[in-house]
Amino acid sequence: MINISPLDLISDSAWFIGLPDNALQQLASSASIRPYARGSFLFTEGELDTDVYCVITGRIRVAISSSGGHDFAITDMTHGSWLGEQGLVSDTGRVASAEALVKSDVLVLPKSAMVALGEQHPLLYRNLLRDHVQRTRELYTLLGGVLFYPLRARVAGRLLQMLNEYGIKQEDALLVDLKLTQNDFARLALGSRQRVNKIFRDWSERGIVETRGDRLAVLNVALLEAEVSLE
Amino acid sequence: MTDSDLPAIVSRSPWFKGLPSQALQALSDAAVQRSLAIGECIYRQGFPTTEIFCVISGRVRVSLHSPNGHEFALVEREPETWFGEPGLIGDEGRVLEASAIDPTQLLVIPREIVLEIGEQHPLMYKNLFHYNQQTLRSMHQLVGGILFYPLKARVAGRLLYLLDDHGQQTEDGLLMDIKVSQNDFARLALGSRQRVNKIFRDWNVRGLVETRHDYLLVPDRALLEEEISLFE
C-alpha cells in the first residue's frame, strides 16, 4: 500500500484552494486509496459512477470511443491530476472512460463528501468551474487540431505536448520520460498504426527522433516543431 | 424588446437561479441591449472577453477557425441561451469565435458586476459549474460524432439535431422553421460544399428530404436516422 496522506493531495489541489483546513480534513477522512492494475478502468463510458479521483502514481488515460471500437485518447493524467467531477452534477453516466495504462494508485472521494463540502463552501464550485473552463479550452484546441491538421502535424503536436510535460534534458536530446508506443501515438492523434509508424521512420531517418531503450528522444525540437503545419 | 423586459430574462437565467432579488436587480441594472446585423462578430478567436451575453432574439453561431480560414460551426445559441462564462475566469484569448447568423439582439452584462455578485453569492458558481458541465458533455458527444462518423452520418446527425429544436410537425412531415443552406451544413459537418450537395441530392432522390420554399422538410424522421452509420 502506498504511503501518502490524502490531506496533502487535497491541500495541493486547485479544486480546494481557499477552503478552510477543517473542511479539507473532513473531506480527507472520507478518502480511500485504490490500486488499479494495468488495463483496468476507473470508470467506463456510460457507467453510472459518481466518485471523484486523484492520480497518485501511474498514468490514467481518458478516452472516448466509437461504437465500431475505435478509441481516441483525450488526455493522459499523472500524479496530482483530478478527474471525475462530472459525476457531481450529472447522473446520466460517464461521457469518457478512464483506464490505468500502467499499475496505478488513485485517491477516491465519494460524491456525498464532495457535495457536503460544496453545500458548506460553495467556493468549491468556483474552483471547479475554473478547472472546467480550462479543460473545455483544451478540448476545443484538441478538436481544432484533429479537424484541421494532417496526421503528421497531429503526431508532432502530441509529442511536443509530451515533451513539455515529461521532457528530461539530456546532453544531446530531450527524452520523454514515459513509455510510449507508436500505438499510443496512433490513439492520441487518431491515425492508423501503419501511418504513424511511417511518420516515425521518416523522423528517425531525418534525425528528429530516436528510440533509447523504451523511451523516445527528440534530437531536434525545432525540426519537430516545423512538422506542425497545415500542409 | 424594451429595457424593462431585461429583469425577467435575468431572473430566468440558469446561471442566477436561487440568487436573492437584490442580486438579480443589480445584474439587470447593469444589463444593456446590443443589436447585431447578420455576420457581425461578438468575439473573435484569440481575444479575451470581458462581458457575458444572453441571446434575446436571433441566432448566434459559435465556431472554430483554422489558421488558413476553414470554419467549423460547433453550436448555435438561441434565445435565452447564456454564454461568455470563460471571461469570468480569466483573460486568456477565446478559442472559439461567435457571430450573429440572423439579425440578433443580445443582453450584455459587464463581468465586474457578475464577479461582484459571485463574491457575495458563490451559489452562482455552482449554477455555472452545472451549466458548463452540460456544455462539456455535449462537446464530448460532438467530438465523438465528428471523429468517428463519415460525412453523410454527420450531416444527418446535424439535421436531426436541428429538427429537435426547429422541426414543426406538418401533414407531410417535419418542416424546419429556420433556413439552413447546404453551405451551412458543410460548415456544421465539416465537409466540402460539393460533397454535402451530393448527399442532399441523393436524399432528395430517395425522398428523405424535400425543399419547401427554401425550408427543409423531412417526411420520415426514422429514414433519416438510418443514415447515421459508422460505415460509408
Image: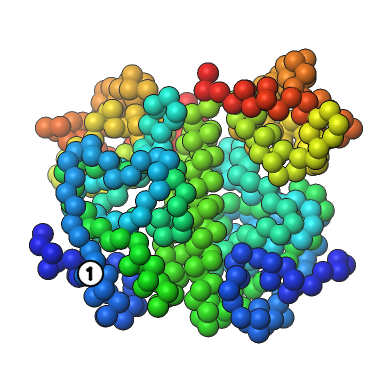
Does A74 appear above or below B190? below
Number of residue marks = 1
In the foreground, A204 or B23 = B23
**In front of the other: B11 or B88:** B88
Q: Which residue is mark 1?
A: B28
**What SS does tag 1 mark?**
helix
Q: Residue at x 25, y 26 (%)?
A: B204
In front here: B76 or B148? B76
Report if residue B227 is visible in the image. Answer: no
Q: Residue at x 30, y 60 (%)?
A: B110
Compared with residue B25, is residue A231 higher up or lower down, i.e. above or below? above
Mark 1 crowdedness (10 Å alpha carbons): few <14, some 14-19, many ≥20:
many
Give the image location of residue B83, x and y in percent. 34, 55
Whole-percent x, y for residue A69 in the image: 62, 39
Q: Is residue A87 above or below residue A66?
A: below
Percent position of residue B151, x then y = 42, 29
Q: Chain of mark 1?
A: B
On the question of residue A74 being in view, the answer is yes
The image quarter in which residue B158 lies: top left
Q: Residue at x 34, y 29 (%)?
A: B186
Residue A81, horizontal then vertical, whole percent: 68, 57
Please name the residue shown 40% across and 48% down the image: B48
Give the residue type that dot 1 points to: Ser
